Image (tube, coloured by chain):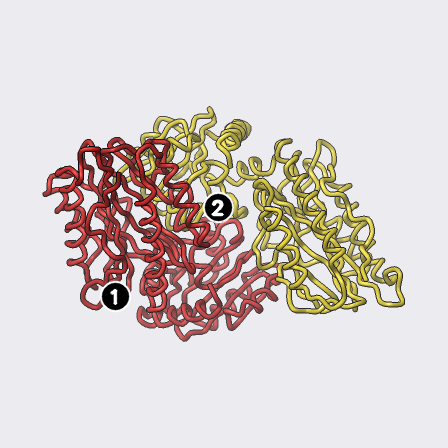
Chain colours: A yellow, B red
């Protein structure tokens, strides 16, 4: 991220600290070249080798306590007002800085629920507690998850504009896949075709190359999060693709569904059409239910129930996640109350959150119908960021 | 890493578990797309979204307990013999697997000292403890740092051969810098020249682009770990560069020193020559002291003392770190007993460890003299992996 964007995010963070009445937020890290706290790019803009603390206070003040060898670099990066280099041990300067802040609460980079707010490793946490020996700071520690959820989740207009561009570019690539699809090619060939175009246009992939895109074809296809296989695409298959790009630092994440006509067909069979329509309608229902203050699981339920009532099995994942600089971003998740999702489904939608809506159902003997759209939460509803898929794409 | 290399490493891990009498080693992770455990590439070879446990036992058995959506992908990757997918919560299958192992000790991915063995985040650790509720497994948890240090530190012949190639390619680039250097160019220009060549040859950078290479020129230059600046290189400057490439997955990390002659000079001034010679000799002394069983700080002391006795200030960092797939790799560090290095300087050198040796000293009015060589620890000494810098490089 550019220095300007980081300084904007730090300013936004200070406002969130005021809103939540937290005096200071500290991101405590080491050897970010080996394991990188997910917030470092947004909050710091450079690496750290030895134990380092990046502190933002409610008053908007910032402190970087870092190894002395990195002092010049930190000055050049220019994102922190006060830089405190140390040589042998961080402890003394670190406590000096905190003593001047006299914090009521210290939010740190840990969270049981949100991986984005959970950057401090357990061994490093024990080190931190040691530094706090003889003080009462350990008792003031709280999770930064609410701060991170707000900071990453509340997108600026500029951020949403970039994501709209990313979506337009992504949907162009989906259109090219529509032209490329023909009987006899494999899922892997489709994926290579898509990755080639993406690279040529200078875009990144929104997630791991192994399954970006995922391509699913026909009955007996693999589940979501699987990579494309050598399975051959045939007439009578429902085909879908899950794909996103990284564009100017932001991700898109979309899915579309195709049907490959058999010789005698000029439209999809009734059961395929019905599956597609149920998915499309379930997305409309989710979007109609979305507004600030709703809890994530409430929206998931709307869609999950509708799909089951329509006679299909429930989908084995959440309805939609937030998107931003990372593909799985923000806090609140529109997902079911399953233990694996922690408290994320219990969090509330906020204005300017960007969500995917991505239900899925199985059409027996044909394949999987999925559509994934992207929306931004507005004051009283949603704005569609992606031009919706209204009809199943027919290919021969 | 390829499937074959991962399976080799898993086999090596099982041997290390036997050597240390530890029944099982578990790497517990989630959302590796947001924060990636440093061992995942070497031990698993794919990503994980929900809470996931990758278990290696003393008997060489392997278990992956993962979210059901990633079952197909994990099968395709093929690095784990037993795959246990779960839908709503990991707990039940997870405990089932551990119950069958009946471990005496459970090494997990946490360490106070080694960032490479410290991949479990604090929030996730609390989740793990919750899963262990009602069992006595929490009391069996130990750090995996010794296992990780051995597994990453003990290089195979194949690994060392790749690193030798990486070093040869890196030293070629240093030679090209010798031809490129002239008065009036800036540190940044040198860095761009080096990054251009690296990219053209299809190599990666061994560490963060901001300071790979670092280029330091003249008196009043920045400290190590600083990026190159707009400082202009002039006659009478000592210049040095810290640079490494990533080659077939392995890193090099080397430094060389130049002197830019003034019009009337055909060799370096006596004080520059002396500084260079002290650095060179201090490296010889370190290498002569290195052998299996020596502790990291003992080697650091040899060099640190020699440099101080020679009348220079001690260097503000460790003498040498291990190198491998990451630039800062392995466990044992040849560094001073400073708190910031934790227990790493107290660990012992082992056969087949690959270390840098990189002392530094300031030559007043001229700049910084540094040389960084790479060596492999042998049964009773070291093998030089890099062709040593014997003379200061003179440029005009």
Hey, which quadrant is residue B240 in on the image? top left
Q: Nearer the viewer, residue B345 or A215?
A: A215
- Which of pointers 2 and 1 indicates the residue nearer the eye? 1
* Residue A129 in view (yes/no): no
Q: Is the same chain shared between marks 2 and 1?
A: no
The crowd level at tag 1 (other Cα within 10 Å; few <14, some 14-19, many 20+) is some
Q: Quadrant of the C terminus of chain A?
A: bottom right
Q: Nearer the viewer, residue A15 or B92?
A: A15
Chain letter belonging to callout 2: A
The crowd level at tag 2 (other Cα within 10 Å; few <14, some 14-19, many 20+) is many
Identify the residue position indicated by label 1 in the image.
B351
Q: Which residue is depicted at the point 58% across and 55% down?
A: A340
Element type where label 1 sits in the image: loop
Q: Nearer the viewer, residue B237 or A167?
A: B237
Extreme residue toward the top, this view:
A59
Q: Which residue is depicted at the point 28% across and 49% down?
A: B342
Element type where label 2 sits in the image: loop
Q: Which mark is residue B77?
A: none
B130 over A261 or under it: above or below: above
Q: Which mark is residue A118?
A: 2
Q: Nearer the viewer, residue A241 or B237?
A: B237
């Amino acid at each position: 991220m550019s220095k300007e964007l980081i300084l904007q995010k730090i300013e936004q963070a200070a406002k969130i600290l005021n809103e939540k009445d937290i005096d200071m937020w500290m991101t405590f890290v080491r050897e970010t070249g080996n394991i990188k706290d997910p917030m470092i790019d947004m909050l710091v803009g450079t690496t750290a080798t030895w134990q380092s603390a990046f502190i933002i206070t409610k008053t908007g003040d910032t402190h970087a306590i870092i190894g002395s060898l990195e002092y010049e670099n930190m000055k050049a990066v220019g994102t922190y007002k006060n830089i405190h280099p140390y040589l042998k041990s961080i402890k003394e300067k670190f406590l000096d800085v905190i003593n001047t802040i006299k914090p009521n609460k210290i939010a740190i980079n840990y969270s049981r629920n949100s991986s984005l707010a959970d950057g401090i490793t357990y061994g490093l946490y024990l080190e931190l507690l040691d530094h706090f020996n003889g003080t009462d700071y350990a008792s003031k520690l709280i999770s930064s998850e609410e701060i991170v959820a707000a900071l990453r989740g509340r997108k600026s207009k500029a951020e949403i504009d970039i994501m709209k561009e990313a979506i337009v570019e992504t949907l162009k690539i989906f259109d090219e896949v529509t032209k490329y699809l023909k009987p006899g090619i494999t899922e892997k060939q489709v994926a290579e075709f898509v990755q080639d175009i993406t690279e040529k246009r200078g875009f990144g992939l929104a997630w791991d190359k192994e399954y970006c895109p995922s391509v699913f074809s026909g009955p007996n296809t693999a589940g979501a999060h699987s990579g494309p296989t050598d399975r051959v695409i045939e007439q009578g298959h429902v085909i879908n693709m899950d794909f996103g790009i990284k564009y100017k630092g932001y991700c898109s994440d979309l899915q579309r569904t195709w049907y490959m006509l058999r010789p005698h067909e000029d439209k999809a069979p009734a059961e395929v059409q019905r599956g597609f329509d149920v998915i499309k309608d379930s997305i409309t229902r989710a979007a109609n239910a979305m507004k600030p203050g709703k809890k994530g699981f409430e929206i998931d339920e709307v869609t999950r129930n509708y799909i089951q009532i329509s006679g299909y099995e429930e989908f084995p994942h959440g309805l939609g996640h937030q998107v931003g600089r990372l593909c799985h971003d923000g806090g609140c998740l529109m997902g079911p109350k399953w233990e694996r999702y922690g408290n994320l489904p219990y969090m509330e939608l906020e204005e300017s959150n960007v969500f995917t809506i991505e239900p899925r159902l199985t059409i027996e003997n044909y394949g999987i119908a999925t559509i994934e759209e992207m929306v931004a939460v507005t004051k009283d509803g949603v704005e569609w960021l992606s031009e919706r898929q209204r009809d199943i794409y027919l290919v021969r």
